[in-house]
Structure formats: C-alpha cells, structure tokens
Amino acid sequence: MAGLFAPFVAALFAPILVKNFGAKAALVLAIVPGLLFCHYSTMLGEISLGQIITGGVQWVPTLGVNFSWLIDGLSLTFALLISGIGALILIYAGAYLKGHEYLGRFLAFILLFMGAMQGLVLSDSFLMLFVFWELTSITSFLLIGFDHKREAARRAALQALLVTGLGGLSLLAGLIVVWNITGVREMSLLLATGDSLRESPFYLLAFILVLGGAFTKSAQFPLHFWLPNAMEAPTPVSAYLHSATMVKAGVYLLMRLNPVMGDTIPWETVLPLFGTVTLAVGTLLAVRQTDLKLMLAYTTVASLGLLVLLVGIGTEKAIAAATLYLIAHSLFKGALFMIAGAIDYATGTRDITKLGGLRKELPMTFVTGLIAAFSMGGIFPLYGFIAKEEIYYALSDLWPLHAWGLIVVVLANALMFAIAFGVGLKPFVGREIKTPKYAHDGPAGLLLGPIILALAGLAAGLFWTTSHFYFASPTASAVAGEVITITISVVPTINAAFLLSMVTMAFGALAYWKLELLRSRVAQILAAIGWGPNRGFDQFISGTISVAVTVTRATQSGKFQRYMTITFALLDCALLLPMVFAGELPVWPHFPIARLYDWAMVLIAAIGILAVVFAKNRLIAIVSLGIQGFAVAVIYMLYGAPDVSFTQFMVETLSVVILALVMTKLNLSVEDHRLNGERLVDFSIAAAVGIGFTLLLFKVLEGQLDLRIPHYFEKYSTSIAHGRNIVNVILVDFRAVDTLGEIGVVMVAGLAILALIRIRATRNQSAISEGQQD
Amino acid sequence: MQTLIFRTIAPYVCALMILFSIFVCLRGHNEPGGGFIGGLIAVSALALYGISNGVNAVRKGIIVHPMAIAGFGLLWCAMIGLVSLFFNQPFFTGQWVFPEMFGVIVALSTPLFFDIGVYFVVVGAITSIVLELEEDSD
C-alpha cells in the first residue's frame, strides 16, 4: 500500500529536489521506482507459481467501496515494466531536460503518472481502477502539454484528454453495467463469476462500453489520431507513456477481462477486425513519416492493433503471443524512442532525411539502437523474434480462419521491420550529412536507459526459459484464466512460422531498401484521400462550439425583461397546467374573516396594487408596491404571526429603499416605455401567476395539515430549547443547519450582487474615459 | 434629501435603531424578534445614515468592509455548530448554561450566539449592497 502512494509522495518533493540539486535530483527520484521494482521482483517467485496476492482496506464501508489491490501475473508484469522503465526514464529525463526551467515540474508529472499507472494495473476494485485510469489521462494531458507555449502542444494535449477522457466515461459506464450484471465490484471476485457475464442479455452493452474505454486509450483506428499528435510531448514522455505503458492500459483492460468477457462472438469478431485495421493503417502511416518520433508513434499504433487482434483471437497460442509481444514491445519501443531522443539531442534534428553517417560520432547510440531495432524487426536471438514466431504459430494454426489477419500481419511486420531499421540503422550509415548541431554521443544518462532496455530484450531472448517462467507464462495464465505454459524456444526450427518469418524479413528488407519510394507512394494516396480522423476531430470540436454558440445566442438574449417573461410564463405553466389537466381545481374556500378592519387592510393592499399598475412613473410604482406590502404585513399581524409580520415590514422597507436606489444607480428611465401590446402580454402573465398562486394556496388549505410537527415544536420549544418564541426556536435551534445554509445563501447573493454592481460601474467608467479620449 | 434637519436628526435615529436592533435580536428567543429581523433593522439604520450623511461616513463608522462582517458572521455560525461536538453530541445540538450575573440568572446558549451570527451576516451582506448602490447615486 505504501508502494501505491510512493510515486505520488515523490512527485511532491520533485520540484524542491530539483531546485536544490538541479538535474541530479532525477537520480535521487529514480530511487523510488527502483525500490518499487525491487519490491515487485521479490514477488516474482510466488506469482510464477500461480499464486495471487490480494489485499486492501475498506474505504467507504457504507457504500461498499474498497481500496483493494490484486497482484497476479498480468499485474506484476505491468508493475515491473512501469517501475523499471520508469526509473530509467527519470534518469533519462534528468539528462534530456538538464537545465530546463521546469524540470522539477516535469519530473513531478512523470512520477504522478507512474503512480497512476501503477495504481491502474494493481487495482482490484472497479472504482479504484476508474480513478487511476482517469488520473493517467490527466497526467498524460499535463505531460503532452508540458511545452505549453506552443499551440500544437496545447492542441495535442487537449485532444488526448478529450479522447481518452471520453473513453474513461465509457469505461465507467461499462464497469457499472458489469457490476449490475454480476453484483461484484472487485476484479478478483469478477474473475470467479464464470459465465454469468457472457450469458447476460446486457453483455453486448457492457462489451461496447468497455471497448469504448480500451480503444480510446489504446489508440485503435479510427480513434488513433491522438497518439501521433501526443508526440508533441518531450521524448521521455513519448518513450514512457505513449509507447511502453499508458497506451497499453486499454490492452491491459481487455486482457484483464478476457477470462469473463472473451470467447464470445462479438469479442472474436470486433477485436480482430479493429486490431487488423489499426495494424494496417498504423504501419502505412508510419511509412509516410520522416520524423523519427512520428515513425515510431505510428508503429506503436500498429503494435497496439496487433495486440488487440491477438487478444481478440483468444486461443492459447494467441494469448501467449500477445503476452510475449507486449513485453517485447515495451522494451524495444521504449529503447528506440529514447534513441530517437538521443539523436535529436545530439544533432538537433529528428528528420530522417537530414540524418546519415552518424555511426562514428554516436557509436554507443548506434549499437544500442541497432539491438533495439533487431528486436523490433524480430530477428534472432532477440525477444522480439520469439514474440513474432509465436504470433505466426498462433495465426497459422488457425488457417484458413483469420487468413486476412495473417496476411496483414505479415505485411505489417515487414513494414515495421523496415521502420525499425529506418530508426535504428539508417541515421547511422550512409553518407554523412551535416546536422544543425555538432554531433556527439549524449551523456551517460541519455544512454543508460536505452542500453538497459535493449540488453533486457537481448537477455529475455537468450534466456528464454527463465523469462518465460517468470514473466510470460504467469501473465498469459492470468489473461487466459487458466494455466498456460509457454514453451517456444529462441532456437529456430523449420516450420510454417519460420517460413513466414523469412518472408517477412525478405519483404522488410525490400521495404527498407525502397523506403523513400514507398513513402512518396503512401503520401500520394493520403493526399488523394485528404480527409482523416485528425481533421474530423477538429471539425467535430468546432461543430460542437458553433452549436453551443447558436444555442446560447438563442436562449441567452441578455435582456432582463426577456428572462423575467420566460421565468414567469414557465411558472404559470407549472402552477396552472397540472391543476387544469388533472381536474384538481380547488373549490372556493370558506373564509372565516368578517371583521371590518381585515377587509380594510385588504382594501388598502388592493389600492396599492392598482396604484402600481396604473402609475406612469416607476418611482411611484415602487413606493406603491410598499403600500401593498405593509398592508399584507398588517394582515399577518392581525392573524397572530408577529414574527412574520415584523420581518415583512423590514423587508418591505428595505426593498423600497433598494429598488429606488437601483433605479437611480442604473439610470433607468423614470417613464415606462413599453408598448400597449407588450403591457398586455406582461399583464396576462402576471395575472396568471397571481391566480395560480391563489389557487395553489386554496388547494393546500383543502388538504389535512399534518399537525404532528407543529405539536412536536409546541411541546418541546420551551421544555428542551428554553424558548417561548417557536418561530425563532425553529430557526436557531431545531433547524439551525437550514438557517446556516440560508445565511450562506444571503452572503453569496450579497457577493454576487456586489460584483454585478461593480462590473456595471467600471464599464460605465471605461465608457466615459473612452468618450473623453475621443 | 440632505436637508439640515434630516442630516442633524439621522445620527440619533440611526443610533436608536441600532440599539433597538440589538434589543430585538437578543429578545428573539422568547418574544417576536431574532437575528434576522434585528439585522434588517440595523441595515435600515445604516441605509438611513448613508442617505443623510453620505456613504463614507457609514464606511468610517463601521470600520471594516460590511462583507467582512458578513463573512465573520457566517464563520461564527459554523463554529457555533461545532461546539456540541465537544460534548459528543450531533452538529448544532443546543448547549445551555445558566450563570448568575449581578444577581440575575442569565440564560446563555449556543442558539443565542448562533442568532447573533445570523444578525451579522444579514447586516453585512445587505449593508454592502445598499452602500454600493448609494455610493454613486449622490
């Protein structure tokens, strides 16, 4: 539990540390994820034997909400990737952004994200999962928009937040549906519910909603566009969030839910379909790019598509392949991104057409990049090779089912092979091109991360039995919901998968050779299509805004008179329509009054009202309104409500004073300028309100009053509350909390009115001063 | 409005009204009255003084900004509600003591102090509106 909060606490201290120690603070901060990595490593033995660690505390017991975690093979692999790559990224970021004005803030954001992502994969309760899920979206927003002075960065940040935030809401709805179907709100319990989710009539609804969350987060076509735009973020962010960890959250979710949601027709149709399309689109768009980071970003989209495809197929082999590829991808893609950042740092450009022959200047970067590219290209004996072999096993086993998927995968893998070497080899070989900056190997901090990740990819491939035992097999078992033992060896054997591998490499080498030609062809096709989801997003946003503007213009005229008319007209409808249509008009009540002075007061009130209506001058109307108010106050007095009457007197006095002041302050004209037609409309609305309220009160009087509450107050007012004035005792004792709320409203209303008056006053003043300048 | 007679008498009337407002506020528990009505009376008194002698005289007289008075009152009321927590009773449970002062038993209670807070909120909030409106009109 302390581990769950450690990154957040570290984030709190990051700015102070950077202030005092400069870029070295990153090394100190990297200790936190480093320790977490060690902590999770100690669990490896236990988890690899198929055990599950759960724990937690009750959070809001009355709502049944728990703060609970679940560690199985899947969560542990993710947690290790997050903390391990996180530590390397912190070191890398310290070197990459050394001396940057906001380095402290940046490291704090990275740590916040780390905490959120780690929470996401370890969450057991749905609510926690959702909260952490949203936190990753928010921290991703902060990191993409880190360079907030550039408009492109701001737009990309907002776009990512909107797309993934929308997906988050969809996920929340999905989880609520799942909860309603199964009655559990913990992942560990959900996994034990068996087929109940699949057999539910609401399965499809839950499925679509959960997919909404997973597909936005994992950038599936056609919602993929935010991910390449997110490359506006500094490179450490791209390496960490937008390739190795966050974008895998959607895949994580699908893998997590596979045992209870998978193996159905919608699952096995929709996932492979979207996955295949995303894979194809991602690789084709990747070829189009010349920016190293964008090339990698689009292949990330493609890889995510591949993962979704494999999870969707859902056979034992496919899940094993997905697991292997997931780990391999995090390692090589993280490394390649950091390499791209290191090239950028060293040369001042990321444009592949402006890079070449760097092997002499950047030897370390070159070697590291090459190893990572080997893994991405799926070449013996790296981990990527094992993953790719397993993918081909899984797909060729099913032949001719998913034949299209297989063809796309082979071609896409070939293109990814070409791009891997486009990033990891091409800038280093060939003719030397003069770069904007003097090219040299970056500092150790920049190289440590990619070297470790690239070597990890190599080691995981060479020592495949160990890596399968500790990482891949437990993860695949958790995804499948049953024990899967991955046996694939790094030693190649001649079979269908190996042949496919050969074909891939041949095509890949061809594509690498003709990369320029391919790029211009894809560019031509894209130019012919013109429109893409990215532009669609802009159109959607501007469309939303223009609809909002139109609606606002129509409903908010800014004319007080119009607002009053609408408010009172609606009040009329609310008062009269139900009574008329339900046939519940009250009967004329029996009035108990016969006293002369009662009638006299009613008469005075009536005279006051008539004076208001017929007054030509608004000031007179206001004062006449006071007459009516005082008369009503006297009537209250006569009927034994001194408190109410007292208040009415004061309120009437003050309203006359304030209204008169408002008149003078706002320079309202004394005369009433309404046309006769307008007056008639206003009059009918006002009269209807009066009649409506009268009828309502009559109706209330018809009913039996429940006297228990008055009796209670009468009984206890003096005996408990020591007060004889029941009204006051109710206000300050029995219902004191209400009164507290009311005086809060008085205070806020006062503040609002004050602000309104001042806005008006300053506007007048500025109008005057402008007039003087003219 | 600023005739000599009005200007001369207004301070006395104002003082009397304030005194009366306090009286009304305090007696509220047993007789008609209470913090809300008392507050409104005090507002009228200050408004009257503002009309006769100008807004600045009022602002000087009450020293702090009226909104600060309202804010104090609201905070005060909320704090009064917390008193009962020390006696392990729910929020806003009335607490009573009956000390003897100068030979008279005086009933002191949290509802009484709560009412005084209400008085302050009403005085502060409405006075600030009235003063703001009066300010430019002269």
Image: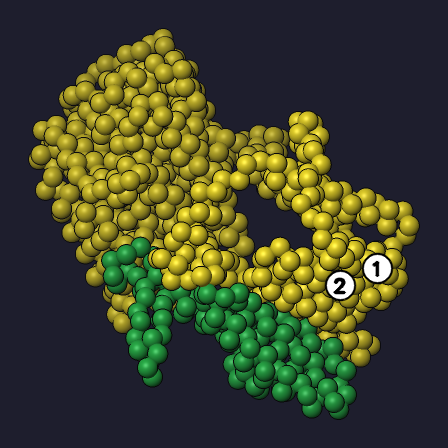
Chain colours: A yellow, B green
Residue B22 horizontal/vertical position (percent): 51, 76
Q: How many marks?
A: 2
Q: Which residue is mark 1?
A: A611
Residue A115 in view of the camera:
yes
Corner quadrant of residue A269: top left
- The residue nearer to you, when weighing A571 against A403, is A571
Disc 1 crowd, CA 10 A, few/some/many (<14, 14-19, 20+): some
* Chain letter of the residue carrying label 2: A
* Chain letter of the residue carrying label 1: A
On screen, residue A555 versus residue A71, left or right, reads right
- The residue nearer to you, when weighing A404 against B29, is B29
Q: Residue furthest right?
A: A676
A739 above or below A330? below
Q: Residue at x 36, y 71 (%)?
A: B107
In the structure shown, which secondary structural element does the residue marked by tag 2 occupy?
helix
- The residue nearer to you, when weighing A315 against A546, is A546
Disc 2 crowd, CA 10 A, few/some/many (<14, 14-19, 20+): many
Q: Are marks 1 and 2 in contact (CB under 8 Å)?
A: yes
On screen, residue B70 versus residue A633, left or right, reads left
Q: Residue at x 91, y 50 (%)?
A: A676
Q: Residue furthest front?
A: A595
Corner quadrant of residue A200: top left
Q: Residue at x 56, y 86 (%)?
A: B61
Q: Which residue is mark 2?
A: A627
Residue A682 horizontal/vertical position (percent): 81, 48
- The residue nearer to you, when weighing A198 against A406, is A198
Residue A1 horizontal/vertical position (percent): 19, 47
Q: Amino acid at mark 1?
A: Ala
